[in-house]
Image (cartoon, coloured by chain):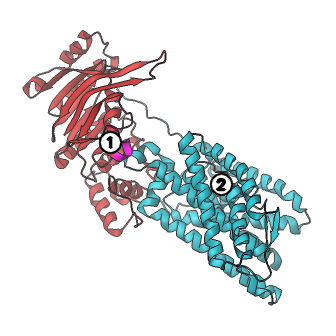
Chain colours: A cyan, B red
Amino acid sequence: MHYLLTDTLIAGLPLLPVVMGIYLVIRIRQDFDLTVDGSLTLGGAVAAVSLNHGLPVPVAIIAAIAAGMLAGLVTTTLHLAFRVPVILAGLVMSIGMRTLNLRVLGRPSTSLDAGAGLFGGLSGLAPTAHDWIVIAILAAFALVFLAGVSLLLLTEVGLALRATGVNVGMARAQGVDDRRSLALCLALANAGAGLSGALIVQSQGFADSSTGTGTLLAGIGAVLLGELVARPGSASRVGRVALSVLAGTVLYRAILVGALRAGLEATDLDGITALILVAAVAVNRYLPTLNKILPRPRSRAAPGARSSPPVRSTASRRPEPVAEEVG
Amino acid sequence: MLCLENIRLVHNPGTPTEVTALDGLDLHIPAGQFVTVVGSNGAGKSSLVNVVSGVHRPRSGRVIIDGRDVTRLPDHARAAWISRVFDNPLAGTAPELSLADNLALAMARGGRRRLRPALTRQRRELMRAQLATLGLGLENRLTDPVALFSAGQRQSVTMLMAGLTQPKLLLLDEHLAALDPRTRARVLELTVRMHDRLGCASLMITHSMRQAIDVGDRLLVMARGRVVFDAAGPDKTNLTPSDLVDIIAGLGDAPTDRQLLAG
């Protein structure tokens, strides 16, 4: 049980930045950015190479974040310059970055030099103490990133970003340049992926050219799980959004770690991810029906509201009915 | 204030579906003037709105606001001068965001958006005071997502948002069309009050001949991408809805049933 907890946290906390980034893209911008698969690997590769060249840890981490951010801006540029959908621009990037990442790493997999990285000085400790110190450091990085993004969302700039995802026409009428918002969103998401990559590589002790593969899907799984648990409901409830990302990521990882502990092979995990996605989508889809049958808890955030806030499901989100014109 | 010079707007140029939406349109609206616009479907009313707001860039001609040529500026870059209210009452607000967030978005319109909190206590108080003037009890619902509001409430909020900064032009694109009669009267009254308070120019597209005559200082009839009738003062107040229908019908444009009924 104890190992289930520590393994979950050690594997899950480094993912928090990228899941927060994925939340921004899929929920706030309502788009899909596959670039994160590439930027997570890139962040890890840049961090590993920097550390092995003897650069200090903060420099390596900042370089990883910057590399991810740059990748996000390239995707934005592809989207804006050639008017291809973001999902296609991201797909092209994720393929192209496989080559880039191999070039950065120099070979498919590289170990960190002994003693290098955030956790290099901890090798002499007892396993339990070691694990908890690693968890504390990872949590500090992940939570600072989460808090930073949440605070940003609460600013005028962040509000503009949230508005463009919900109603572009209205946002433009209010003077918001939606291209700038998109650039900010993808830059943040991929900066998060870069940070996640750097944290993963340092906690694992090696960088691999396939670390980031499947990140977007895993992130979507975590986001959906988080929404089931924490019910952010509206993009105005930024604290709830952060909480839902936190809960979703940890829960997602707990399920995977639990599956391994229950005797499944590492190769089975992709299947588990798929099942989590299907289950989360199904529950999100049928939750309104379930809510009607089960007694409904009172909505805290909306006093005086005539109905509880609509459940976020991809199907019911996009178009609003145009009101019938009256004479 | 607003000056349109020889505007030509063509949709789908070079294709079989090519349509000339605005055909050498000239229009000057001085500051403070309230202008109503009627015309049959396809007359160019919406194209006029889209060219003024910057959604469409005209093929030729110039759009000048307050002496500044804005022809090449996109819509979001014109938001400092223009407040828009849409025909769809749900289009002017972001449904998933709270009422406070929607209003905060409008408060920063036209200015540079900064890394400072979008919502402050001061701003919330200002919002409550403004919302109270609507008389809809919305001042107690700042944290509710706007999706929970009725179409009339949302259009009222959009009107309010339009007046949170000091625009030069209030652009109203059939903003009453989708409302029920009582709500329509209330939002219309709000519109007139807003125009008077802001002292800006207003351009209101409408389907209702009655509204076009009763409201504002000047009335335009559009047909085939031009202004074909322009009346102000007593010329305008002495018009009857059937005069307007005759003008539109006389041009060979069929007045729609709705216009006839709305008369």
Q: Is residue A4 left or right of residue B107?
A: right
Residue A1 in view (yes/no): no
Q: Is residue A259 above or below residue B71?
A: below
Q: Is residue B149 above or below residue A15?
A: above
Answer with the quarter of the image where residue B252 lies.
Answer: top left
Q: Nearer the viewer, mark 2 or mark 1?
A: 1
User: Looking at numbered disc 1 in the image, what kind of residue is underneath it?
Assistant: Arg
The residue that label 2 is drawn on is A294
The quarter of the image holding the C terminus of chain B is: top left
Numbered disc 1: secondary structure: strand
Q: Which residue is at 39% across, 64% downward?
A: B119
Q: Nearer the viewer, residue A283 or A234?
A: A234
Same chain under badges 2 and 1? The reply is: no
Magenta segment range?
B71-77
Badge 2 marks a residue whose secondary structure is: loop
Which one is in front, A255 or A111? Answer: A111
Q: Position of residue B236 (x, y in %)?
A: 13, 25
The disc label shown at residue B84, or none: 1
Q: Chain of mark 2?
A: A
Q: Residue furthest left?
A: B234
